[in-house]
Image: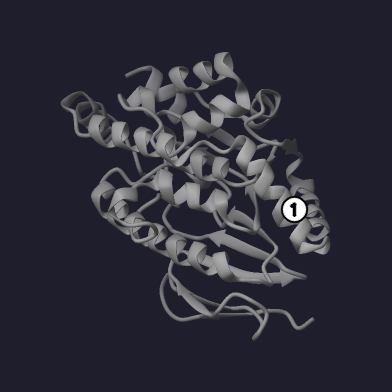
Amino acid sequence: MTPPAMVWIGEGAHISDVHAGEGLMMQEYRTLRVTEVEGGVVSVVIDAPPMNLIGPELVRDLVTLFGELESAVDARVVVLESADPEYFVPHVDLTTVAEYTAEAAKAGGPDDASLGMLWHKLSELPVVTIAKLRGRARGAGSELALACDMRFAARENTVLGQPEVGFGVLPGAGGIQHLGRLLGRGRAMEAILGAADFDAEQAERYGWINRALPDTELDAFVARLARRIASFPADAVRSAKQVLNDLTLPAADAIRSDARLFQQLVRSETVQARIATLFAQGLQTRGPLELDLGNRIGSL
């Protein structure tokens, strides 16, 4: 198979060229690198410097990608990862909430204007989705991983967290719904109300991720699993995923309710004051606060 071509078209912008006639149309993305690896496996690398915050450009690209994957008959398995070894997706860009919410609405209309409903669309895609985690995945970044069908993480450097309660809000993009199902009531209470960071080994024990693997083994393990699933009859894989979704996915109305509560609380004076304090300490910049956000929130 001829390797896929990657054409750079300017600062921060990519065109990913999957093989003609083999599924995904050629699209322009500014924050994603999308290539077909082999046999129906698609690699999606988040590359949104300086640290993969969820803002309007990344959301716009994900809306486009999810739309393509809905009808890409030759795409069987999608592996989602980060180009930044320190940050998978740290959280939303708190300076662009209205803007990224408007972009998310383009996936489902004004009644579904939230990251939660966009991530819910990811869960319902006919392709199998695997999050390959390195670095920090907190808040809506953790919720993006939770919306994928499976999660595998590098043992040495993965950090997961739902810090929203420490800010004064609640996880609004599916985190409560997914963690309540995956972890059970008590552990979900600990993870969400405690708002602390979890390393990969602890996240594996609790059920937040499928497995924690040595960093040197992560890529090969995920590649083998993706190729294996992609090699099976597509109808069987998609049917099995649909049945499992019917059993385990939260209802759309539950996601919408969490999103409304998040959008209501995030505008409060209490939340804005706590956010301002964290910005003064280095929030949304590469530095000690973001690296250790779970502990720093606990000292506010």
Q: Is residue 151 visible?
A: no
Left or right: 21, with 65 as reference point = right
237 or 178, nearer to the observer:
237
63 or 52, nearer to the observer:
63
The residue lying at 60 percent from left, 20 percent from top is: 184
Quadrant, the C terminus: top left
Residue 22 x/y as whole percent: 68, 80
Q: Is residue 12 above or below residue 232?
A: below
- State which quadrant residue 73 falls in: bottom right
The kind of residue on which mark 1 rests is Asp
Check disc 1 and report its element: helix, strand or loop: helix
Residue 244 x/y as whole percent: 68, 42
Residue 188 x/y as whole percent: 54, 21
Q: Is residue 299 visible?
A: yes
- State which quadrant residue 263 falls in: top left
Left or right: 170, with 70 as reference point = left
Within 10 Å of the Cα at label 1, are there few (<14), some (14-19), or many (20+) other Cα atoms?
some
Residue 166 x/y as whole percent: 36, 23
The residue lying at 42 percent from left, 78 percent from top is: 10
Number of labelled discs? 1
Seen as rendered, the residue at the extreme bottom is 20
Quadrant, the N terminus: bottom right
Q: What colour scheme governs how the chains and residues are painted in the rendered image of this protein?
A: one colour
Seen as rendered, the residue at the extreme left is 269
108 or 211, nearer to the observer:
108
The residue lying at 38 percent from left, 35 percent from top is: 172
Which residue is tagged 1? 219
